[in-house]
Image: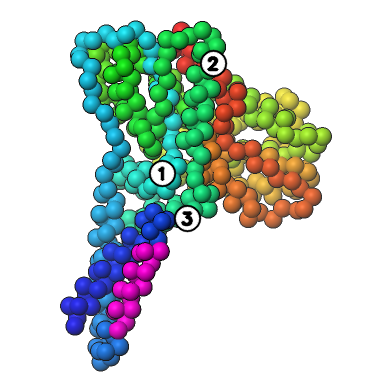
Amino acid sequence: MSFTSIIIGLIIGLTIVKYLIVHQSKIRLFSLILIFEVILFLSIIYYNKEFTPILIILNLLSILAGYYLMTIKVLSMKDMRHVPDIVRKKGDLGKGHTAIIYFSHGEPEDYNPIGWINQFREFDEQKIKFIPFLIRPIFLSLLRKKYMHIGKSQHKRMHKRMMGQLEKRFRQEGDDKIRLYLSFIEDEPRPDAAVIEALNDGASKIIVSEVFLTISNHTAEGKELIEKLNLKEYGVSIYFTGPLWDSKILQQMFVERVNKNRGNTEKKKIGVLLVGHGQPEEWDKAWPTETAQEIEFRRKILELFLKDGYERKNLDLAWMEFRHPCTSVAIQKLIKNGVKKIFYFSAAISADSIHSMCDLPELIAKCKIPKDVEVINLGAWNDDPLVIDAIKEKIDAVYK
């Protein structure tokens, strides 16, 4: 009987992890399986009452063991994103056109844990502390919950629109020699897959447009994937634009967006909050540029708001997580200053995502906001014309 209890416990542990990480369409199935397994165990307890204490102990230990084993399996999941073969011969100089690899963070439209599993693996390799091992399935479950809340992420769709606007700009200038390819670090297609496609299409020059705010592990990972292709063997020159933290055009976009949305409210009654993503201080040891550039970018934006007539006391920076001040503290500070409207941005997010559509609005909703104060989410960068200008300016710096 003790052997049966151990087996059932192992199965329960395995099922718990599967229940936590499966696609939302399978939650009901695994919840029913889990309920059946628990009922089965309870029936064993009921018919063997004299062994109840030892059976419970054995079962709990075996549940933990099953949970641990399934967690190992889940976090060892391979990245199955497609990477095509290179069919171009070495030494082939191509057809003379330039390929622009539009490269950004990426977020699957529907729940898929592989992006975060890759992130866990990368942090472990770099010995960067993050979510404890046994808590990771719970973290993935919370991610799934966010997808269930917003329905679908608009991140990829928005980047497609942004790339389309970028291509339109080039065509309006009479440039029909470039070809654009979409790529993401955490979605399909990967940056190396996009580069291979451009290579096979005969590109003679490749420009990687890094649609990120800062230099970080994400930009480094993309660069590493691309550099492994050894493009010099194919006579192809490659250039990286660098991220957008120092773009004056992008910084100006925030001021213009507030001006377009403030209505008749006086500037002295307007509060502006630029919310950064944030990373733990220990991560700064590996990637100090991420925090430093994110802070510098937002400080430059505040300077532009000052020049445009907004009051310094009503302009502030905050973080979503890990750092201070947190969003709620910054919001309360602005409210105490007597503002009537507060505009907030997901300042480091390039396109609509779970962070800008779910996480940050939820943080704001938890703040105690008076009824006479209007709080308005101005979101991520998205396809604002100035954002497209900023991306193109970076490309032009290495293209022309």
Q: Is residue 237 visible?
A: no
Quarter holding residue 282:
top left
Kind of residue sitting beneath label 2 = Arg
Query: Which of pointers 2 and 3 lies earlier in the amino acid sequence?
Result: 3
Q: Which secondary structure lies at badge 2?
A: helix
- Circle 1 sits on which residue? 282
Q: Tell which of 104 and 325 is nearer to you.
A: 104
Q: Nearer the viewer, mark 2 or mark 3?
A: 2
Scheme of image coloration: rainbow
Q: Is residue 176 visible?
A: yes
Q: What's the mark number on residue 145? A: 3
Q: Which secondary structure lies at badge 3?
A: helix
Disc 1 from disc 3: Cα separation? 28 Å
Residue 16 position in % (x across, y down): 34, 65
Q: In the image, is residue 26 above or below residue 171? A: below
Q: Residue at x 53, y 49 (%)?
A: 150
Q: Residues within 10 Å of mark 1 (few under 14, many from 20)?
A: few
Quarter holding residue 135:
bottom left
Query: Which of pointers 1 and 2 lies earlier in the amino acid sequence?
Result: 2
Q: Residue at x 32, y 8 (%)?
A: 95
Q: Nearer the viewer, mark 1 or mark 3?
A: 3
Q: Residue at x 52, y 27 (%)?
A: 162
Q: Which residues are magenta?
A: 28-43
Q: How many marks?
A: 3
Q: Nearer the viewer, mark 1 or mark 2?
A: 2
Q: What's the mark number on residue 349? A: none
- The quarter of the rendered structure image containing the N terminus is bottom left
- Circle 2 sits on which residue? 169
